[in-house]
Amino acid sequence: GVHGYLGLHNILPQDLLRRGQEEVRLHGGAIEEGEVREIRKEEDGHFTVSTSSGHHTTKRLLLATGLRDRLPECDCFHDFYGKSAFHCADCDGYEYSGKEVVAFGKGRSLIKYAVSLLTWTDQVTVVNCGAPYSEEQQEQLKALRIKVFEGDLS
């Protein structure tokens, strides 16, 4: 499910997608899945979009390119995914307010993510799977009381 989505707590992802598509249509929009081959802005300000299914002309253009979650390549991760392992603090962070959480990843992006988790809890540990942190990065984490796990995960 999708958690923490304002006004739609615990909605299933496919239901959120369906509702969003209904709302687009309610406001006169159209949804077309396909491959965009070319977009041209015409002299009158309109756009001409050539897709795998034809040509479309419109005043406004919204590109929804999607999002891919990069999940860890880790033995048995999927045994826990959606139960006690999550990928989105915005969606699932609230349920873990005040609890101990672990952020798994590497590099500066892991530090940034760990800092964002402080919104929900002050009990954050990072498992850095990349190059060791610099002294400055270690000091930053220490100042924020974010623990760093170092060692073999196997």
Image (cartoon, rainbow, N blue to C red):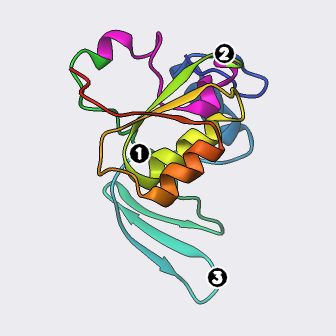
Residue, disc 1: 33
For the N terminus, the quadrant is top right
Mark 3 residue element:
loop
What residue is at 64 percent from the left and 27 percent from the top? 19
- Image-based side of 51 in relation to 56, left or right: left
**Magenta part of the chain:** 78-96
Displayed quadrant of residue 5: top right
Who comes first in sequence, dot 3 or dot 1?
Answer: 1
- Magenta stretch: includes residue 80: yes
Q: Are marks 1 and 2 in contact (CB under 8 Å)?
A: no
Q: Amino acid at mark 1?
A: Glu
Mark 2 residue element:
helix
Which residue ends up furthest to the bottom in the rendered image?
A: 43
Check the image and report above or below for 137 versus 104. below
Which numbered tag is attached to residue 45? Answer: 3
What residue is at 61 percent from the left and 28 percent from the top? 91
- Image-based side of 26 in relation to 132, left or right: right
Q: CA distance from mark 1 to mark 2?
A: 34 Å
What residue is at 31 percent from the left and 16 percent from the top? 78
For the C terminus, the quadrant is top left
Residue 131, how many percent across, how many down? 29, 51
Who comes first in sequence, dot 3 or dot 2?
Answer: 3
Residue 132, how many percent across, how many down? 33, 50
Q: Amino acid at mark 3?
A: Gly
Q: Amino acid at mark 2?
A: Glu
Residue, disc 2: 95
Q: Neighbour class for label 3 at 10 Å: few (<14), some, many (≥20)?
A: few
Q: Closer to the camera: disc 3 or disc 2?
A: 2
Q: Is residue 65 at least partly visible in the picture?
A: no
Residue 18, how many percent across, how many down? 58, 26
Who comes first in sequence, dot 1 or dot 2?
Answer: 1
Q: Nearer the viewer, residue 87 or 111?
A: 111
